[in-house]
Image (tube, grey):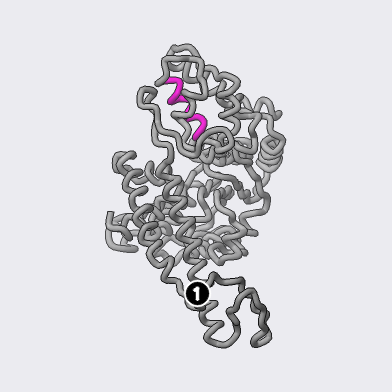
């Protein structure tokens, strides 16, 4: 199948060279049995590429309609994930009143797509590695291994190599999954594709609801291309559909568009824009952004606290000298300290109390973001987790932690 036919079949819009490279790789590797690791941010279309790989492989006719099993590893509670993946026998645990096949057995002869593989607990990573190496699964409560023939396509939106370095993902499993990798670039790095995608989504809505399509002014088009699109193609599709359905004006100007964009590029627009109530605009800063900022700041403060504690320990051990712009060598180490303001004491620069209260405020901020996301999703945790761009497991843990 040539690339243009492939793009039409799977509704892939765009001509970015890296997107074309990814499509070529998917087509070339599809007939093989290599394990594939698809990387890229959330919303770039990793699930579409899993279908391309499966439906252009020799496994596509295996049990039509069940040959590709998709599993979101981040959405399965840690306590049940082994049973979900590998199945269980009757009596394996309380409530197991009958034996049940797992996803791997269901996919036997076909392909299994493991999305959010980076969320897989370490204990399960060991068992998955055994499956990939031996082609065998062990249902929970069973002493007999089952032979299976499954092709694995995995995907992640995290920096998997960083996870390996931090000990959160097994290096041997990474290399076993990554027999060939496919990288999907984020939408903000495919700026020329954004107007094409907007036009396609606009036309789809117009055809579906029998209404005139919406069009962008040149200024609005530039605003769309400057927008960071952290939700990528999924976010662009949702916003285009919202505008097409809500707005009576079919020519979209920046004034209209800014009511639908939660991030406004600072070089063109103010950092925070008040919503236009008459146009039905939403929040200027989304709950997801609030949570991500809180998590990022929390990590930064944790690192700062750790560094300050290390400095205090070094001072106590005589390894560090605090002075006014002086350098000193103690214990074989070079210590450099900047100038202090008049009257400042050494302890002023070494005590972490100045930031001790920040985590409380950050926790409140994070809790508020989660509560608002849950309210917005009508209590649906899966939708709320997607809005916050975290896994359902992380959301469950946060809900329990904050008593929400």
Q: Quadrant of the N terminus?
A: top right
Tag 1 residue:
343
Residue 234 in view: no
- In the displayed structure, would residue 297 be above or below residue 384? below
Quarter residue 178 falls in: bottom right
Q: Is residue 147 left or right of residue 29?
A: left
Which quadrant would residue 20 be assigned to in this image?
Answer: top right
Please tell me which residue is depicted at 56% across the width and 71% down the height of the picture: 340
Spot occupied by residue 394 in the image (x, y as percentages of width and height): 41, 55
- Compare residues 349 and 24 and report the one nearer the observer: 349
Residue at image x 46%, y 23%? 256
* Above/below status of 61 relative to 153: above
Residue 332 image point, x, y percent: 68, 86
Residue span colored magenta: 235-245
Picture residue at 49% right of the left edge, 44% below the top: 70
Helix, strand or loop status at disc 1: loop
Judged left or right of residue 34, residue 63 is left
Indicate left or right for 73 with 153 as reference.
Answer: left
Q: Position of residue 337 (x, y in %)?
A: 61, 74
Q: Is residue 242 magenta?
A: yes
Question: What secondary structure characterizes most of the magenta part?
Answer: helix
Give how far across and how far down residue 111 sits, in percent.
55, 45
**Going 34% across and 46% down the picture, which residue do you hit?**
381
């Amino acid at each position: 199948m040539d690339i243009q036919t492939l793009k039409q079949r799977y509704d892939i819009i765009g001509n970015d060279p890296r997107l074309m490279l990814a499509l070529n790789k998917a087509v070339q590797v599809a007939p093989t049995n290599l394990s594939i690791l698809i990387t890229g941010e959330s919303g770039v279309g990793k699930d579409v590429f899993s279908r391309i790989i499966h439906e252009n492989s020799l496994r596509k006719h295996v049990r039509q309609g069940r040959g590709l099993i998709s599993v979101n590893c981040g959405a399965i509670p840690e306590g049940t994930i082994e049973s979900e993946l590998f199945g269980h026998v009757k009596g394996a645990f309380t409530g197991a009143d009958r034996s049940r096949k797992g996803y791997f057995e269901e996919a036997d002869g076909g392909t299994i797509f493991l999305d959010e593989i980076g969320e897989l607990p370490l204990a399960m990573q060991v068992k998955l590695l055994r499956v990939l190496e031996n082609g065998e699964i062990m249902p929970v409560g069973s002493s007999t291994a089952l032979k299976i023939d499954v092709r694995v396509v995995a995907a992640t939106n995290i920096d998997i190599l960083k996870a390996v370095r931090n000990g959160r993902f097994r290096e041997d499993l990474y290399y076993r999954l990554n027999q060939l990798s496919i990288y999907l670039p984020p939408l903000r790095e495919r700026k020329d594709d954004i107007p094409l995608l907007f036009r396609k989504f606009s036309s789809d809505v117009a055809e579906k609801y029998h209404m005139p399509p919406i069009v962008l002014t040149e200024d609005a088009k530039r605003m769309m291309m400057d927008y960071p699109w952290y939700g990528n193609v999924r976010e662009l599709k949702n916003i285009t559909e919202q505008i097409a359905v809500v707005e009576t004006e079919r020519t979209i100007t920046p004034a209209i568009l800014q009511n639908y964009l939660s991030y406004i590029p600072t070089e063109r627009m103010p950092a925070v824009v008040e919503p236009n109530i008459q146009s039905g605009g939403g929040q200027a800063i989304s709950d997801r952004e609030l949570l991500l900022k809180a998590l990022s700041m929390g990590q930064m403060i944790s690192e700062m606290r750790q560094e300050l504690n290390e400095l205090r320990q070094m001072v106590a051990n005589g390894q560090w000298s605090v002075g006014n712009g002086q350098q000193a060598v103690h214990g074989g180490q070079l210590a450099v300290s900047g100038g202090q303001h008049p009257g400042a004491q050494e302890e002023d620069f070494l005590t972490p109390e100045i930031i001790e209260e920040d985590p409380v405020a950050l926790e409140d901020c994070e809790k508020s973001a989660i509560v608002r996301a849950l309210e917005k999703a009508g209590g649906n945790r899966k939708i709320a987790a997607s809005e916050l761009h975290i896994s359902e497991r992380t959301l469950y843990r946060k809900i329990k932690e904050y008593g929400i």
